[in-house]
Amino acid sequence: MAPIVRWAGGPRPLLFDLAVAGFFTWLAITHVSAPVAWPPVVAAAVFGALLVRRRFPLAALVIAGAALVAGANLLPLVVAVYTLASRRGPGWQTAAGGAVALAAFLLPAGIRWSEDWPYVLLGAGVFLLVPLLAGLWWHQRAKLLAALRERAEQAERERDLLTERAVVAERRRIAGEMHDVVAHRVSVIAVQAGALTVTCDGQAAAAAEVIRQNSTAALTELREVLRVLRDGEADVHPASGLDGLGALVDDARAAGTRAELSVPDPLPEVAIPVGRAAYRVVQEALTNIGKHAPGARARVAVAVRGAELTVEVADDGSGDRAPARELPSSGFGLVGMRERVGLAGGTVHTGRSGSGFLVRAVFPLTTDEEAG
């Protein structure tokens, strides 16, 4: 069963209503020009009516009007009129309450209309009409604010929806461009490399097979990325972690880089974002060595030092760095590497090391979420 009276917002509104009810009850009984009939009964009725005036404004007004007829002060009736108008607004309850308040105002006055009507109109206007109009204004203001708030929330929802639609459209456009351009080019490379493996022999056939395998793997990964961009699917093949470093080193060796791998046994257990970031660091570093210093000797080292995981990729600078052999570069490899490592909670350092180049990434073994 629902309670008769509920104070929304906690104890503050309750304390305010208790104070208002007590103050105006005291005024109703003590500040009168004539004796009040049954003072304890009238005081209890006025106090209860003012206490529940928000939930039962019409009943509170009727009780305050009856108390006025019994000889109590007019001010509780003024409060009840304002509360009724502000809570119910223009409607039959407000009209009925106004009629009851006017009747209660006129009954105990002993008015002589031939002489007192100007004072009656003035008193009714000050004590009844003014609080009635003030309550109606407050009611309309509250409705207007609620409508404006709802309109603002609706506009925000529509803006978010339009933004989401724009993002989806842009993702599909990018997916279409990648499919039409990148997928086509990589498919041609895979087909031509496959033909070379059949028509050539020896070292040329082996190199063509490496090209075919890598281009086929690139097509598979590209299809997964396109599915994510176009349909928002998240169940693509997850990126490898530390356990995939061996395959990366093998691919680099097949491409002509003399790569060596040093990892602890067993491999340390790291968070998934850390493992993926470490894998991508090694992948990007080996790719850069193959592009800018083919044939160089590269060293990939993974070590645990205290509570940190260190990943280093360095080359000795012995590769062929002829500009004519360098492939086109987007310039975003190191930037993306730093962003990925930063998202995993680590730091990365890149720079010259002797005659070669060094990439060092340091990750925490325990993330903030696991520590908490």
Image: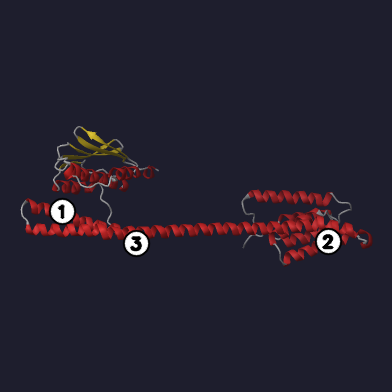
Earlier sequence position, callout 3 versus callout 1:
1
* Residue occupying the far top of the picture: 354
Q: Name the residue under label 2.
A: 104
Earlier sequence position, callout 2 versus callout 1:
2
* Residue occupying the far front of the picture: 324
Q: Name the residue under label 3.
A: 231
What is the distance, in whole Å, between disc 2 and disc 3 at their CAs?
71 Å
Kindly report which numbered mark, 3 or 1, lies closer to the viewer in this rendering. 1
Q: Where is residue 367 in the image (x, y as percent from the top left)?
A: 35, 43
Q: Which amino acid does label 3 sit on?
A: Asp
Query: Quick one: label 3, few (<14), some, or many (20+) residues within 10 Å?
Result: few
Kindly report which numbered mark, 2 or 3, lies closer to the viewer in this rendering. 3
Residue sitting at 17 percent across and 57 percent down?
Answer: 189
Q: Name the residue under label 1.
A: 211
Query: Quick one: label 1, few (<14), some, or many (20+) residues within 10 Å?
Result: many
Q: Which amino acid does label 2 sit on?
A: Ala
